[in-house]
Amino acid sequence: MSRQNTLRIGEVATQAGVNIETLRYYERRGILEEPRGPMMLWLLRVLVSVVLSLPVGAVVTPSTASAQQQNAEARVTLRIDGMTCASCGVAVRTALRRLDGVRQAEVNFDEKRARVVYNPRRVTPERMVRAIEDLGYHARVEERS
């Protein structure tokens, strides 16, 4: 790439309105890469405008976003047919709790229902139904919230 299309780090930082350390921070994380040219300058300006539009005190990092995704929570009620005793309810509850992403599972034998709190990014109600059916019961999603 010719010199006219490559900018020094100080030039990019000045034109984007950030200090050199901010630019180096983004480079170290692979957000901005060499060569420092017009495209990098444009990307940096976009990043700066996004950051400046955030409320004062807001902190957004990849780890924060990842934590929010991992902590996502949903609830589902499953209708279960074929349970004949309280031990059946215990077996269903155990199978549900073993699924990755299920945080809480309560089975009511009398109502023939299971109420489950889960992370929708890790497990689906359809997967829960399959786990119950693998035990020999019939199950279906009754209500999602």
Image (cartoon, grey):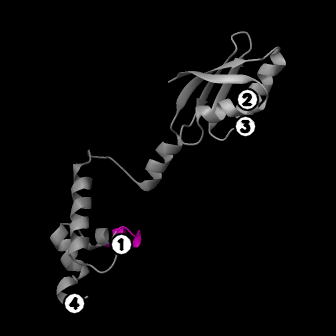
Q: Dot 4 surroundings within 10 Å: few (below 14), some, or many (20 or more)?
A: few
Secondary structure found at label 3: loop
Which residue extends farthest top? Answer: 110
* Mark pair 2, 4: CA separation: 65 Å
Question: Which picture quadrant has residue 32?
Answer: bottom left
Q: Amino acid at mark 4?
A: Ser
Q: Which residue is mark 3?
A: 98
In the picture provided, is 20 more to the left or to the right than 121?
left
Discs 4, 3 touching: Cβ within 8 Å: no
Nearest to N terminus: mark 1 or mark 4:
4
**Which residue sits at x=74%, y=14%?**
109
Q: Which residue is mark 4?
A: 2
Residue 119: x percent and y percent?
Answer: 56, 37
* Mark pair 2, 1: CA separation: 51 Å
Q: Amino acid at mark 1?
A: Glu
Nearest to N terminus: mark 2 or mark 4:
4
* Mark pair 1, 3: CA separation: 42 Å
**Which residue sits at x=75%, y=26%?**
92
Residue nearest the viewer, comparing 125 with 133: 133
Q: Which residue is mark 1?
A: 27
Residue nearest the viewer, comparing 138 with 44: 138
Q: Which residue is mark 2?
A: 133
Is-magenta flag for residue 112?
Answer: no
Residue 86 drawn above or below residue 60: above
In the picture provided, is 110 more to the left or to the right than 144?
right
Q: Amino acid at mark 3?
A: Arg
Question: Which picture quadrant has residue 76?
Answer: top right
Residue 46: x percent and y percent?
Answer: 23, 60
**Which residue sits at x=71%, y=33%?**
131
**Range of residues picked out in magenta:** 24-31
Nearest to N terminus: mark 2 or mark 1:
1
Foreground tag (2 vs 3): 2
